[in-house]
Amino acid sequence: MTLSLLHQILDYSNRSNPYPLYEELRKTPVYREDGGPYVVSTYYEIRSLFHDPRISSDTRNRTGSAADPLGGDSHEEAALPPSFLKLDPPEHDRLRRMTNRPFGPPHSPHRVDGMRPELREIITGLIDGISDPSRFDLVEEVSYPFPVTVICRLLGVPREDEARFHVWADTLAASLDPDPDADSADRGKVANEARMQLGMYLAGLIEERRKNPGDDMLSQLATAKGEDGPMTTMELLSTAALLLIAGHETTVNLITNGMLTLLRHPDVLKRLRREPGLAVPLVEELLRYEPPVQLVPQRTTLAEIEIRGVTIPKGSPVWLVLAAGNRDPQRFKDPDRFDPDRPDVQHLGLGSGIHSCFGAPLARLETQFALSELARRLEKPRLIEDPPPYRQNAVLRGPRQLHIACDGIRP
């Protein structure tokens, strides 16, 4: 049986290289099949919808008749209320503003930049600790532990608890994947159980921080008394869960996709070794070329919208395929070429508009540190398996493992 184009994109057998399918998808900028979601794949249309107030991030606005047959996030989120990622203004704006106070400008302008020495210390220690340079898994030894350690320190979550929240995080990340073959009811039940367990764990930490606050973000959020007042306990739990999971899931993929891309482009890898400053534009091009979030399947129309001659009814599910838009030849010249010198890289890799990635400054910095240090210190690194095995997830796309061999590690 021949799978439809959308099912081919979601099919795991195409995970290692979905880009030819995205090219086919762009031929129909607003694509729909079998009463399913409206799938938007071209750059300018995606960017416009990110800024369109008629597009909602709150799936509770979806009408029953326009339900998404491919699943996605159709299950109820009874364990915790939606995070601000899944809310619209004004609720979204209030919670994001409150969350940003201890994280970024204007109230905490040096929070991320001040972590540079700590980031260098963490990534240096991880590379020093690589068990066997002749063959190691980058995900297990660097890409995963680096952002997890960083987000734990930032939030004030004990790093030794990683084994506990790792399972919950994996379950919740998997629930984002619109797998057409999965039982949505069963998956929703499992996801709700993970949310409940994570919520109970975070509730204990928050209670401790209220009694004995430190200088971590969890303490600051738990004791905040800003212009918006304090968060409710449930708002604080959902926000903390979002920061803990989103604070490492996408960065793991970004670092791993980045090293895979560099190993496939050895000239760029050699150049990065000579020019560590190249890491800044390189990460921006990487966010275009191999974005860690490939698609956003969680938007709903609040009114009838016309896009490229297609009328989308109110209450309809809309998917934004960021990875397809990032390689739209109408926006980027020679889009399938990895070019860290590419000018004007206004990619969609971190979203846009009010829902642009909250942790973008930290994710960028972590990836710049990781890739520049790996390029500098690994002696003649090479891929053992190409393509590597990928994670099941079509939304958060990245290698599950990335086995690398090298001749040694420089000091």
Image (tube, rainbow, N blue to C red):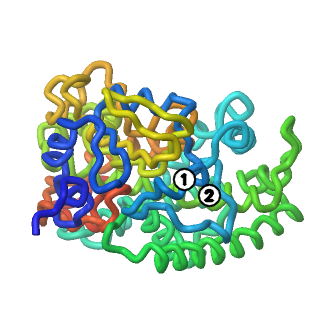
Query: Which of label 1 and label 2 is nearer to you?
Result: 1
Q: CA distance from mark 1 to mark 2?
A: 41 Å
Seen from the viewer's position, the closer of residues 408 and 152 is: 152
Above or below, 53 against 374 in this view is above
Above or below, 73 against 275 in this view is below
Q: Which residue is mark 2?
A: 153
Instruction: Check the image and name the residue furthest to the front.
Output: 65
| Quarter of image, res 235 | bottom right
Quadrant in which the N terminus is drawn: bottom left
Residue 100 pos. (x, y %): 68, 40
Secondary element at tag 2: helix
Classify mark 1: residues with Cα within 10 Å, few (<14), some (14-19) or many (20+): some
Q: Amino acid at mark 2?
A: Arg
Asked whether residue 31 is in view, the answer is: yes
Q: Which residue: 29% across, 56% down?
A: 34
Q: Which residue is mark 1?
A: 63
Asked whether residue 280 is in view, the answer is: no
